[in-house]
Image (cartoon, coloured by chain):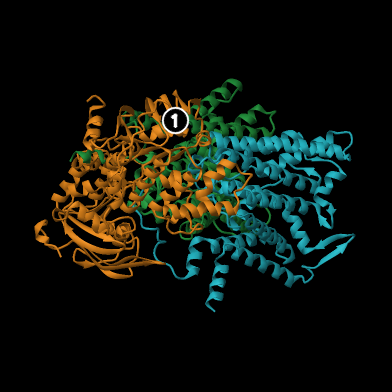
Amino acid sequence: MATDQLTSPKAPADARPSFGSRVRKLRIDERYLPVLGTMVVLIAMLAIGGSRYENFLTGRVIANVLINNSFLVVIAVGMTFVILTGGIDLSVGAVVALSGCVAAWMFTHGYSAAVAIPLVILVGTVIGLVVGVMVHVFEIQPFIATLAAMFLARGLCYIVAPESIPITDPTIVSLARTRWGTDDGLVITPSGAIALAVVAIAFVTLHYTRFGRTVYAIGGGEQSAKLMGLPVARTKVLVYVISGTCAGLGGLLFAIFSRSGYALTGVGMELDAIAAVVIGGTLLTGGSGFVLGSVLGVLVLGLIQTIITFEGTLSSWWTKIFIGALLLIFVVLQRLLVLRRR
Amino acid sequence: MSSVMSSAGAITRHRLFWPIVALAVLLLACVLKSNTFLNITVLDGHLYGGPIDIVRRSSVLLLVALGMTLVIATRGIDLSVGAVMAIAGAVALSQIAASDNPESLAVVLSAIGSAVLVCLMIGVFNGFLVAVVGIQPIIATLVIMTAGRGIAMLITGGQITTVTSGPYHTIATGYWLGLPVAALIAGFFFLVMALVTRRTALGVLIESVGINPVASRLAGVRARTIIWTVYVLCAFFACVAGFIRSSDIMAADANNAGLFIELDAILAVVIGGTSLAGGKFSLVGTLVGVLVITTLTFSVTILGIPANAVSLFKALVVILVCLLQSPVVRHKLRARRRAVAPAPVEVPA
Amino acid sequence: MTDTAVTTQNPTPIVAMTGISITFPGVKALDGVDFRLFPGEVHALMGENGAGKSTLIKALTGVYTIDSGSIIVDGEERTFAGPAQAQAAGISTVYQEVNLCDNLSVAENIMLGHEVRTAGVVNWPRTRNAAREHLRTMNLDIDPKSSLSSHSLAVQQLVAISRAMVVDAQVLILDEPTSSLDADEVARLFDVVRALRDRGVAILFVSHFLDQVYEISDRMTVLRNGTLVGEYLTAELDRVELVQKMIGRALAVLEELEEAPKRSVAQRGDTQPYVQAIGLGRKGTIEPFDLDVYAGEVVGLAGLLGSGRTELARLLYGADHADSGEIRVEGVPTKMRTPRTALARGIVYSSESRKTEGIVGDLTVRENIVLGLQADRGWLRRISKRKSDEVVNRYIEALGIRPANPEAIAGNLSGGNQQKVLLARWLATAPKLLLLDEPTRGIDVGAKAEIQKLVADLAAQGMAVVFISAELEEVLRLSHRIAVLRDRRKVAEITNSDDVTTDDVVHLIASGGQS
């Protein structure tokens, strides 16, 4: 019947005439745009630093950026998983401190590295599991759940290590001192290698496993992911377990770096991790972003620190202002990108 | 009989039930440990005692949480409040220190005025990023949270500015009409906001914007203005809190003033029943939340909990309250529920 | 009982629900309902708003637990704990909102959960090939690598059906699948549905578009107020009977409206239009158009999906900015910067997405109704309880809002009642021009009629109305003049009269105005 053709209904307001295939090509590129932007900034900073200071663009300096921030790389990787699902993890700094304190405690009580190291990482895993249960089973918002976990971990720190405990275990010391590579050129330490390995594993997981794609799916729409029959519950809990484990591992790396366990470490580290992830192009709303971007974000933050050191005369408060300004530029650009897309 | 049961049920189902229970338990524990805890004595026309201390110590957190409640109600969050507190103290004290007569009331008032101006500008900045540019609040306010302390240090020249100023010092330590000035300030602003939000339409408009910003805008609500305003208010209250804090120690410590107070404030708001997802809010609830957190910190000293167990104790209480308040547990405690809360049957729009 | 042998080869139902009852506090949503699904058949579930269609489906897929009755799937008695389990047992649902993740690629949306793996990791080339195969059966030629969000809703829906087929569904539930599709897309969907039916899949089709139901279904079950009215073969039940069974009464109201002569406000040498759009347009959403709207008349906007009707209304309201042309209100050129400008001039807009753009869900009915008035007054001067009582009670009664409780939470009301609350909000501001965008979409037949009568009455009392509806019969029933849009352009404008039929309008749309 002729009327049929006109009894055709309307599109919902949110599906305004899509520009279809004309824009399709643009959209595929647009998913990578934020990360490419970060890369541009990184290169720009390298260029500025190289032109301004001598010995800036040496292998050693560049390698040190990675080495000195390897713990942050690991933490940022874990944080990426959580943020991709649209959540957040405020406890990572406290977990880093806790891992360090537990490690130091175990060493002073005669445990060997072979026993201590796995247990230290396990501390993070357990806290991550607790958070995961709070978020999924008790439906507490991630912000609050991880905040509570932060208080908990910090509280435990003060019990385990009321005062700073130095670490003198030979394995740890050797891990701290080992360097592979040429003397003046590119150098890598075990910590750096571990960080890179974690990044590689995370990359494969996020892009080549069902679990990883489910992480993205949850960020895209938890209800939809559930209705698609994906294992949403398990995945949601697991991302916090992963973040906790990464924080535990990061804590271990930091303990190797600082060779001590101290209850006040890592204060504010979670915000550094979040900043790195955001600078790396991942959206806080979830569903979009890359773990490699987060790594670039960490490198950007590390480069800022390096530049400040080279500059010499600048005080620590300028670092804060720089990072704040950089963050501002990034999020405004990210926002303009989204606006232009519409 | 059944009406008594259903009233009892309604009371226990209230969002504030568990926080108030927690508060009562803590106070009880304190009284048991030190039975003069709840005594209020009058000395020199000033009131002293446990409850007065709690009220005075809550002032800073109450002010910050007050602004935070409004921001959260619009689906936002403000992480910059600690930095704003630091900046407020830095500006005020630096100006007083640089003046000829730190004891002059005029100097103090002018310094406070400058600080308020600076903090209002920060509020405008935050509001602009969120309401106009459309950046997510957690990141938008992270900018000042990161850079703010650096700015504060810039103002104090990297030092912890200390100064002696009688008038300024009374903010935190003075008494008026027998009550601590700090508590009066906080109480005053709390009452003003409580009245303004419920006597005028501001409260319901804020809720509308938080629940459905798009629909609100289409209904003619000035959504953008409202969102912008709450960030300015939040910065203002954080500024006042900064005055109290810096007045307490007569020093502007850019690094430590208000450190992590945003977390305590958010916690107080959530304990008080306002959801982080925005919408309906309760200032009274926030007050209860603030009292719980302050009493918690207090009780730690009274109960003689060893210093290094303080954080853990606090953490456990917070986790317990959060769990008890969680939707899942509240459902279970109601005992009779089916698989899913029934939505009215309707054809999808 | 009906004769099953007539439409299906297989006389054994694949799903048999018997005596299903579900009670929610205060309301019996389903009362002893029987329902059967046969393989190789399209079975339409009919009933108005609140009849229990969604509840029945949710009972089948395990979203709700049943209080009594049994569900037998493929010969075995089953209860599912949730949609995922139902899916594993071969019952897949495709919802109107297309519950897929649009940040993922097409291939992922189809294959996630059943990816092709090598050595423990996903083999993307092979997985994409598998996806391509499935797309082929839907006659969809799109790139599996492309992001789902880059495709139209119609395509996304077909992708959702592909996913259902990946898990070899024996039962496919289509819940309002055509609400957002245009005629071509509906035709394509129906081809797919018929192909699946011929393959032996049992298809449960829920829709309130009667024409489509008659076109595609073999069998119908009618529910009313949670009870079963009956199961019929489509060929044996005509439209009028169907509607009567659904609502239990004749549509006298609608017949009256159709009979009322359209008094066109055509002779207006002296009156000027209340609102005039001259060359008004916005790049990318609607080409510059002219439109005059006079007090006391209804201007209907007719057109297909994407023709620009909502965009036109939004420009008149200031919800979007025009980049060409001007608007004149009572002859005075006005820049519609924001909705507040429009509101100040008595122009109101009732959005088609009432849930996302209309109702503020957690606020009460009272607060929702008074919102427009309050927003206009500003935050300082709160509307007194007495005044708000008076306004709210007046509209609850006039519009028949149920439940008649001002303190009810608006988000809990049914779609039809939410629409009434929205209308109340706008009417309370005593507007001069009412822009109504799909006010009757997704609500039951009875409420539809009430709203149409209201529109006619308002116009008769002197209000100017712009009426947008996908249902051409409604537009013809109510409008004095009809503006026809196509492909984001206004192509024609006609004066309504008794001889104008829907065919005429269809021709106008099809020919783009050159007829």
Which chain, by letter, is green?
A
A190 lies above or below B155: below
> In the rendered view, does B283 fall on the left or right side of A31?
right
Is residue A64 at least partly visible in the picture?
no
Front residue of this view, candidates B310 and A110: B310
Front residue of this view, candidates A332 and C503: C503
In this structure image, what is the colour of chain B?
A: cyan
Please report the residue visible at 42 percent of the width from the left and 61 percent of the height from the top. B341
Residue B105's x, y, as percent?
87, 40
Front residue of this view, candidates A305 and C127: C127
Q: Which residue is tagged 1?
A: C275
- In the image, farthest residue toward the top: A51
Residue B308's x, y, as percent?
68, 59
Q: Amino acid at mark 1?
A: Val
Residue C151's x, y, as percent?
31, 36
Please report the residue visible at 30 percent of the width from the left and 55 percent of the height from the top. C48
Q: Please, what secondary structure does the residue beneath circle 1 have?
A: strand
The crowding category of the residue bearing disc 1, from other C-alpha atoms within 10 Å (few below 14, some 14 to 19, many at least 20), is: many
C85 lies above or below C323: below
In this structure image, what is the colour of chain C?
A: orange
Q: Quadrant of the C terminus of chain A?
A: top left
Residue A267's x, y, as percent?
62, 47
- In the image, farthest residue toward the bottom: B1
Q: Give the letter of the chain under mark 1.
A: C
Q: Quadrant of the N terminus of chain A?
A: top left
A44 lies above or below A264: above
Q: In this figure, what is the number of numbered marks? A: 1
